[in-house]
Image (cartoon, rainbow, N blue to C red):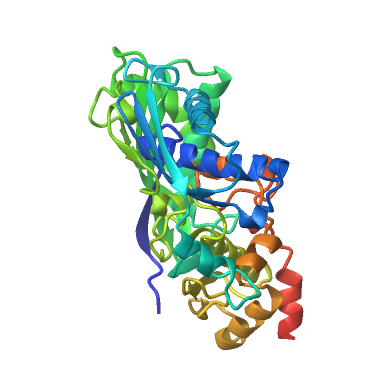
Amino acid sequence: MSRQDYLFTSESVSEGHPDKVCDRISDEVVDAFFRHGPEYGWDPGQLRVACETLATTNRVVIAGETRGPSQITRDYITHLARLAIKDIGYEQEGFSWDKAEVDVHLHAQSADIAQGVDSANNKDEGAGDQGIMFGYACRETPELMPAPIFYAHKILKLLANARHSGESTVLGPDAKSQVTVRYAGGKPVEVTQIVLSTQHLDADLSSHDVQSIVEPYIREALPEGWITPSTIWHVNPTGKFVIGGPDGDCGLTGRKIIVDTYGGAAPHGGGAFSGKDPSKVDRSAAYAARYLAKNVVAADLADRCTIQIAYAIGVSDPLAVYVDLHGTGKVDEAKLEVILREVMNLRPRGIREHLELNKPIYARTSAYGHFGRPAEEDGGFSWERTDLAKEIRSALS
């Protein structure tokens, strides 16, 4: 019997966190290939990107492997990086969109990797790497996400909206949130601790001053009644937070994999998402696993669902599909494992076609989580749809 009364904590980081700046730039590169590749006669299924970014004080280094049109030049990638930094909001002495030095070191994809991915079984695409990917869904929020990570994201998104709209002129781009939720009877009922550290542009602001600015947004983000008189607040607990972003701490692509997924409430296979085209199953299959898990819960077959999918590099078919309903299921898990492989093609090509992943959709995934955002938000995250729920139920009957 699983525990029913406990505390659980998840964190989120804003789009201006140094690692998220790097995720954004790497995903802008992915989008560039899917936006312009077809314009120059490339089949989207043949485009390849594996892009890593490092950011530090007024310097950005972009490196990795690509395959696509030669018209996507280093100068153009540099331009995209600057636009991303500007959009995030960095025009500061230690990190500025127009003054930072941008170095681009992208080169052709390895032929050894390409041959395995392109011609698996001479008929389909192989997985871009070996690995295990997890998807998860639960009934803690209407979006079928764990409550702590969902609300940690929501706090920072509201603060970012206030900053971008001009409603707040003193908040900086770099921020982190952390929410501790108390569960009673297995359900989230209140927040016991709130941690919020946010960069501020006025050096004279105290932690108390910052709390008075951010508290209304935090209260708006959380469900009514979850903040109580006993909730403990930690706002800028170290004091002044003026130097932020890559000027304050070096950033790298792919270092926030738990922030990107379920806040620690579910397993993670270890692979990061940003900077990778959908032939890399550590991205696309994680989206597919979330899609299937969400549809299982949406079909009222369980209150919680974890799905694992495993792959070998160059092999099309998944090695295994595992389903865990955590004792909340209304169906046999082994039978569900078979059904899920029938209702969705889990080969890399099948995933990208079913979820329409060969599009420039990735930059907007780079902050505030890859999961739990409505399918219609920002043009739509296809893996958040619940359009398979009826088909799964029918297949089980």
The one of 265 and 140 positioned closer to us in this rendering? 265
Q: Quadrant of residue 234?
A: top left
Q: How many marks?
A: 0
Q: Quadrant of residue 229?
A: top left
The one of 70 and 217 positioned closer to us in this rendering? 70
- Left or right of 300? Residue 311 is left
- Determine whether 98 is above or below 237 in the image: above
- Determine whether 58 is above or below 390 in the image: above
Q: Which x, y percent locates residue 120?
A: 57, 74
Identify which residue is drawn at 64% across, 66% down: 349
Q: Which x, y percent locates residue 148?
A: 44, 51
Q: Which x, y percent locates residue 189?
A: 47, 54
Identify which residue is drawn at 50% across, 28% down: 75
* Residue reaching furthest to the left: 238
- Determine whether 297 is above or below 357 in the image: below
Q: Quadrant of the C terminus?
A: bottom right
Identify which residue is drawn at 52% across, 76% down: 325
Q: Quadrant of the N terminus?
A: bottom left
Q: Which x, y percent locates residue 152?
A: 45, 44
- Left or right of 388? Residue 250 is left
Q: Is residue 93 visible?
A: yes
- Left or right of 249? Residue 11 is right
